[in-house]
Amino acid sequence: MWRDGAQTAVQGGFASGECWASTYVPEATDYPLRVRGLQALISGDVDGATEAFQVTVWSVDDELRPETELGTALAEFTASNAAFNSAEFDLLAIDDIILDEGSFAISMCLADHAGFPAIAADVGQELLTDRNWLFSDGTWTPSGDFGLTGNWIMRAIIEPQ
């Protein structure tokens, strides 16, 4: 729901290995589709810093919670307060993920750093409780359960097949 130029807040409390995820619910007319990549607003008070993140695509359960890993890769992202980071899955060697139906999620985990850079969330938007997740104690939990009030600023790149 975030639009370029709108207010954001960057989640700086992540520890190394911690993850967030967004669930995507495509329109019926989008199928079949290929999940090509993602765009994310990776930021913080370290503009220009580059860090590694584990990027993973998931199938989701009936509650839209990430469930089964479909593909994963390590990627570097550079913090920016002004521009999205992008990741093309074919360049990351994530095999073609083609869906004929259903929703999916994309997660990012801090590979070997803590704090910033990290994902930004929108400010002043209604939290979609079944679309924003944090991985904690071995399970995916709605981010709102941790007191977060914004949606992760992360977009899936899909391509009709």
Image (cartoon, rainbow, N blue to C red):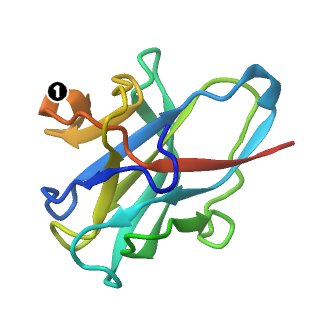
Classify residue 85 as left or right of residue 93.
left
For mark 1, does the 10 Å Cα neighbourhood hold few (<14), some (14 to 19), or many (20 or more) residues?
A: few
Residue 126 position by quadrant: top left
Looking at this view, is 6 or 9 the one in front? 6
Q: From the top left corner, tell me how far across and down residue 136 is, in percent.
A: 17, 40
Name the quarter where the C terminus is drawn.
top right
Q: Nearer the viewer, residue 122 or 62?
A: 122
Say which quarter of the image contains residue 37.
Answer: bottom right
131 and 111: which one is in front? 131
Q: Is residue 129 above or below residue 34?
A: above
Q: Residue at x 31, y 80 (%)?
A: 47
Vertical arrangement, residue 149 with respect to residue 39, above or below: above
Q: Nearer the viewer, residue 2 or 93?
A: 2
Q: Secondary structure at mark 1?
A: helix
**Image location (x, y in percent) of residue 83:** 49, 69
Q: From the viewer's perspective, is 127 left or right of 149?
A: right
The residue lying at 37 percent from left, 65 percent from top is 42
Residue with the mark numbered 1: 145
Residue at x 33%, y 57% (from the top left corner): 119
Q: Position of residue 158 (x, y in %)?
A: 71, 47
Counting from the top left corner in percent of width and height, residue 80 is at 39, 74
